[in-house]
Amino acid sequence: MGLRDRLRDRESVSGSQDHGTAGGQRYKMRERIISIGDDYWIENEAGERAFFIDGKALRIRETLNIKDAQGNDLYKIREKMLRIRDTMDIEDAEGKTAASIKKALITPLRDRFKVEVANGPEMDVQGNILRHEYSIDAGGTKVAEVSKKWFRIRDTYGVEVSPGQNAPLILAITVALDQMVHD
């Protein structure tokens, strides 16, 4: 196998030539994106700004707002205080709980989280959350996959959302998970 063949194989694995997702949507995120007061844009696969993460500084509990490209509030992520296990709530624009994320008490081999969605099925998150290599499943069906393999850029990872899924909610879940494991 020559150098040219290895480079072609590497490009096909990394997705640098083909960013298609078989009907799904892919977003680019930055590793460890959130700390109190950080603001950040989530880009779509075309490199366009799709969602804005607005970190609220100087709050007792961590709060993050997710807005669309026009500045409209979509979701608010809030840390639940004084819980036995890590919990974060995601509220919609009206202040109603859209989802609750809870870390499993015992996780011997892999990180595991449960996501209770208000108007949908419960989701399971499994994989290496810290290294951004995990999947989100609902009822045995993959809802989203998070991975660094699609980007060669340092400190960047991708979120591929399956067709028919609520992309802003999945991205809010991803941001909340990132926040929970990097505390």
Image (cartoon, grey):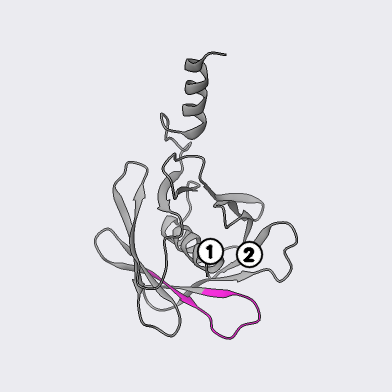
Q: Which amino acid does label 1 sit on?
A: Leu
Q: Are marks 1 and 2 in contact (CB under 8 Å)?
A: yes
Residue designated by label 1: 177
In x, y percent, where is residue 84?
66, 81
**Is 23 in front, or is 67?**
67
**Is 29 in front, or is 123?**
29
Residue designated by label 2: 113
Ranked by sequence position, the earlier of labels 1 and 2 is 2
Work out which quarter of the rendered image holds the N terminus and state it. top right
Question: Mark 2 falls on what kind of element?
Answer: strand
| Magenta region, residue range | 75-88
**Residue drawn at (48%, 22%), measured in percent from left and top?**
7
Neighbour tally class for label 1: few under 14, some 14-19, many 20 plus, Cα within 10 Å: many
> Eyeballing the image, is 64 above or below 163?
below
Q: Distance between the residues labelled 1 and 2?
A: 9 Å
Q: Judge left or right: residue 133 versus residue 172.
A: right
Q: Which amino acid does label 2 sit on?
A: Phe
Snapshot quadrant of residue 65: bottom left
Snapshot quadrant of residue 123: bottom right
In x, y percent, where is residue 28?
40, 48
